[in-house]
Every structure is written in structure tokens, then in C-alpha cells.
Image (spheres, rainbow, N blue to C red):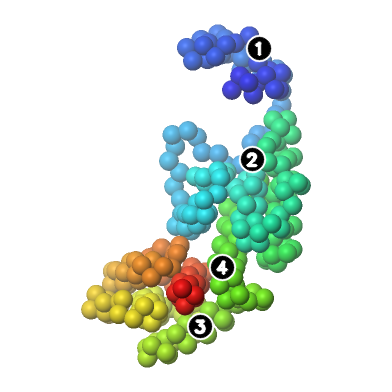
Amino acid sequence: MLQEADKIKARAHITPEDVVKGNPRLNFAFVANLFNTYPALDLPTEQVPEPGVVIEETREEKTYRNFINSLGLEPHVNYLYSDLCDGLIILQLYDIIRPNTVDWSKIYKTFNAIKERFQKLSNCNFAVDYAKEPLRFKMTGIGGADILEGNKTLTLGLVWQIMRAYTLSILQKLAKSSTPIADKDIINWANEKLKSANKTTFLTNFQDQSLSDSMLICDLIDAIKPGSIQYNLLKTSGTPEAKMDNALYAISMARKVGARVYALPDDIVEAKQKMLLTVFACLMASDMNVGKN
């Protein structure tokens, strides 16, 4: 801490021992010197949780955070908005989707205390521009400042598009395709797989509310790995409890056949279109991996 204070010429007369021992007068003098050296600083715009405070997450936030952390990026994401506000995690995700295409020479990896906001905003602006081209994300109404300031709706919208692009990029690589994989390609694959296994279920789209009972998903898993689904364990009453049990089983079995499913059981029960897309995409990737091996 004192080394950082030295860098901005605001250390004053205090030693590490004074800080550790909690010398009230010297600590007060240190903080007062900081204030006098840098008065009228802007209030922080990003939402930084206080130490020791447990931050409640929505299901969507938890899913996206777990997805990011599963890729082994540094630093670890603990709180979605404050940990993405400097743009670095987002840019690392872009580099996974399209390797070696982010121009890191234009990115601030460390920040100067005085210029920190400007530098983080520059990174976030770069992230927004890159999302528009070459990724061609839908970025209406979002700017770098929205990421920097932790705008929840716009940040979640961007992270969802990143997650979708990542999943589809895996499929494209496995398929050795020169063109991006589209939703219809996943639907066609699923129906062909179901038909080849003599299943009677049929996927129309990812908005289909009938997907909430997990029956079609389980049929697809059984088509990928015949005999893997114990159908006597599936419940057909259609109650919320039965659907939840089926969803838990479906996700468990999907992972057992090698699908890296990020969706939660509630996403299936509530037939969340976005998350259902990722479930089927991950199953398709798993099937292509099996065929490859």
C-alpha cells in the first residue's frame, strides 16, 4: 500500500509498522495527506462490494460468472459488474472466441491511479467496438461507459452474446466449417439425431414451452449415447416439482456424456430460450466430439 502511495507522491511520514499497529494519529495524517494531495476526486462509478459483504446474485448472473470462470481467465470473477468494468476479462473472452485477433498493444493492462478511469474507459470502448466488428454483436444503445459503470442490463446482454458466440465457435471448429453455425443448424442436427435413434420427439425452436419437462433433452442424450437414460426415473405428471427433478437429471446426464452445460435446472423448467440454446449447442458439441474420437 505504501509503495503505491509513493508512486503518487502521497506517502507522508508513516511506516508499515504504524499501519499494522493501527496508530490512529499517523493513519489519520496519512489519509489527510491523500485528501490534500488529490482533492475532489470523482466518486467511483463501478459497483464494488464492501469487504465481508455477501453479494446476492440472480440466476443469470451466477450462470454467466460460472461460465467465465470455467475458462480459467485471470483474475477470477467474483462479482460480475465490478470485475468486468476494466474491459480486460471481456477482451480475454474475445481472444478465446477469435484467437490472436485482439490488438493488445492498444489495451491498458495496468492502470495509473490518476488516469485509471480514462484507461478503463478506453478498454471498454475498444471492447464495444470489437463486439460490433468483427463479432457483429447487437450493440444498440451500449457504450464503453455502460460497462465501466456496471450497467446491469447492458452488461448482461453483452455477456450473453459472448457466451453464445463462444459456444457456437466451438461447434464451428468441430465441424471444420468456414461459416458460422446458426440456430437452425443446431435444430436440424437435433432432429436428425432424434430421428436416427427412433425417438418420437421433435424440436421446433428454443422457445417451445414443451421443452420444460426435459423429455426431449433426455431423448437427445439417449440418442447421443444409447442406453444412458433410465426412463423409469423421468416423471410425467407435469408438476413443477416433477419438471425440476427431470431437469436436474437431464443436466446431470448431459454432463456425463461430455456436454459442458452452463444452464441451471430452473432455466429448463422455465423454458428460457437463451439458455436452452446453449444446452442443445453443448450437446451437439459433445456428439461431434464423440464422432471425432
* Disc with the residue nearer the chain's start (4 vs 2): 2
Q: Do the residues labelled 4 and 1 touch (CB within 8 Å)?
A: no
Q: Which amino acid does label 2 sit on?
A: Thr
In the image, which disc is placed on residue 12?
A: 1
Q: What residue type is labelled 4?
A: Ile
Task: Give the foreground label among 3 and 2.
Answer: 3
Task: Give the foreground label among 4 and 2.
Answer: 4
Question: Which residue is pictured at 60% across the width and 49% down the height?
Answer: 89
* Disc with the residue nearer the chain's start (3 vs 1): 1
In the image, which disc is placed on residue 189?
A: 3
Q: Which amino acid does label 3 sit on?
A: Trp
In the image, which disc is placed on residue 45?
A: 2
Q: Which residue lies furthest to the left in this view?
A: 232
Q: Is mark 4 on a helix, strand or loop?
A: helix
Numbered-mark total: 4
Residue 12 sits in quarter: top right
Q: Is residue 1 above or below residue 144?
A: above
Residue 160 locus on image (x, y percent): 57, 62
Question: Which residue is pictured at 45% across the width and 44% down the height?
Answer: 55
Give the labeled residue for mark 4.
170
Distance of mark 3 from mark 2, alpha carbons?
45 Å
Viewer-nearest residue: 180 or 290: 290
Does residue 132 appear in this view?
yes
* Disc with the residue nearer the chain's start (3 vs 4): 4
Q: Which amino acid does label 1 sit on?
A: Ala
In the image, which disc is placed on residue 129?
A: none
271 displayed left or right of 134: left
